[in-house]
Amino acid sequence: MNEDATLHLVHAWEAYAELSMRVVSDVPDERIAAHLQTQQIRHESGLNALGEALKEVLGAEGYVHVSPRFHLLKGSPRKVIAELAAELPADLVVMGTVARTGVPGLIIGNTAQIILNQLSCSVLAIKPPGFQTPVRLD
């Protein structure tokens, strides 16, 4: 990693059923706020766990040297990740890709594909452990 580079760890999240609670139902604002806070805490916990895993891999000294910055973004990952990458501006986005649709031949997930199409920087897409490509080299 370049000495001047900054590592940004990003997690984008949307609250389950938030739109329904706000538009379709008569759920009190306090209950919606409590629901959002619970969801945010859950996602913060996941981002913190990622930071701890990184610290384990790099060691304490390496972690301090890298000094990662954490971003917990509320909103559609399809929108807010590309916006942050442009705002920073990022030179490289490393993104996990999981195709959950079960569609044979789908190599990259829908969300990753949409984000990829919005980025003007380099992208490194990482597949999950055990992924087997459907592409055949004949």
Image (tube, rainbow, N blue to C red):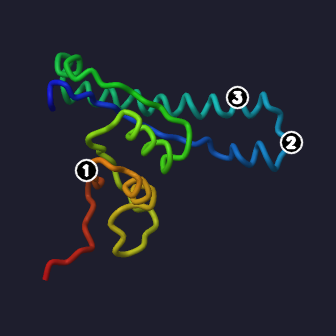
Tell which tag, 3 or 1, sits nearer the viewer: 1
In the image, residue 103 sits, relative to residue 108, either above or below, namely: below
Choose top left, top right, bottom left or bottom right for residue 68.
top left
In the image, residue 131 sits, relative to residue 104, either above or below, namely: above
132 relative to 99 in the view: left or right: left
90 relative to 31 in the view: left or right: left
Residue under the image location 34 percent in, 36 percent down:
89
CA neighbours of label 2 inside 10 A, class few (<14), some (14 to 19), many (20+):
few
Q: CA distance from mark 2 to mark 1?
A: 44 Å
In terms of secondary structure, where does tag 3 sit? Answer: helix
Q: CA distance from mark 3 to mark 1?
A: 37 Å
CA neighbours of label 1 inside 10 A, class few (<14), some (14 to 19), many (20+):
few
In terms of secondary structure, where does tag 2 sit? Answer: loop
Check disc 2 and report the residue beneath it.
26
Quarter of the figure that contains the N terminus: top left
- The amino acid sitting under disc 1 is Leu
Residue under the image location 15 percent in, 78 percent down:
137
Check disc 1 and report the residue beneath it.
124
Check disc 3 and report the residue beneath it.
34
Q: Residue placed farthest to the right in the image?
A: 26
45 or 93, which is in the foreground? 93
